[in-house]
Image: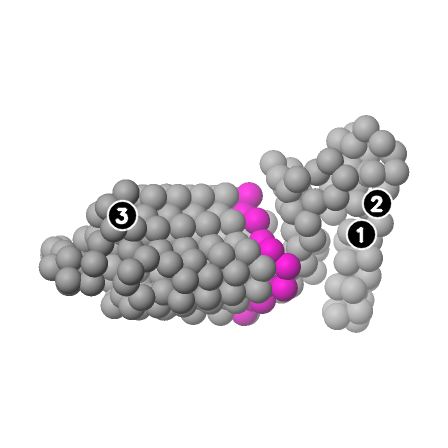
Amino acid sequence: MRKFTQAEFDLFHIDSNGYKICPTGDYSQIKSFHNRCKFEEYSYFGDYSCFGNECVFGRKCSFGAFSLFGKRCTFDDMCIFQIGCEFLDSCSFGIRCIFALCCKFEDKCNFGAISSFGKQCKFGEKCRCEFGEFRYMVSFCGIFEELNSTDVFLLANDSICVRQGLFGGTLKEFVTYCKTRYSSENHGKTYIDLISAIKSQFEIMRGRSLT
């Protein structure tokens, strides 16, 4: 993959819509990118990169730790983000994006299906996942033979949905899934108990029983 310098980046063409067109490459030597940069798929960025508003990224781009993204940035499918990345309002993500721990999302971010979140990620108001607008999300790593993380969403209508690998559905559907998915009854019960504990915390936050 070609590694671009700041001087080369500065010479990239700007299209009729005001986007700087950036080919696939290694941008790790560049730390600051202005508004409306458009990067092709598989591009790579280093730690502490800073992007302006309305940047566009192709599929399978990879971003270093503690990167900062401006408002209304758009990411295609299967992008990967390292620890501590921060996103301002109204960013949008394709399916199967992976976020490491401690990422922070401001208001109205929109996540595609089968996204994966690390621990201690924080979300602003009116963010949306595949199940709809959500208030809170709790994630825990896979246990036993399960490699995928489990993400539990409290939606704006106070219902609870769960994403684990290719499974996505309501809390009730997840309980049924655990009973049939895991060969060991104890393994399935452990997941159900963890989800129940998270549900109890959501109920304390909301001051009411939830489904």
- Pointer 1: residues within 10 angstroms few (<14), some, or many (20+)? few
How many numbered circles does the render carry?
A: 3
- Which residue is pictured at 40% across the width and 67% down the height? 48
Circle 2 SS class: helix
Display colour scheme: one colour
- Label 3 sits on what residue type? Gly
Q: Which residue is mark 2?
A: 190
Q: Which mark is residue 194?
A: 1
Q: Which residue is mark 3?
A: 25
Residue closest to the eye, 155 or 152? 152
Q: Quadrant of residue 180?
A: top right
Quarter of the picture holding the N terminus: top left
| Circle nearer the N terminus (3, 1) | 3
Q: Is residue 69 left or right of residue 207?
A: left
Q: Do labels 2 and 1 touch, CB within 8 Å?
A: yes
Q: Do labels 3 and 2 touch, CB within 8 Å?
A: no
Q: Quadrant of residue 8?
A: bottom left
Residue 106 placement (x, y as % from top left): 49, 69
Circle 3 SS class: loop
Circle 1 SS class: helix
Give the magenta-colored segment's residue range: 114-124
- Label 2 sits on what residue type? Thr
Residue 104 placement (x, y as % from top left): 52, 67
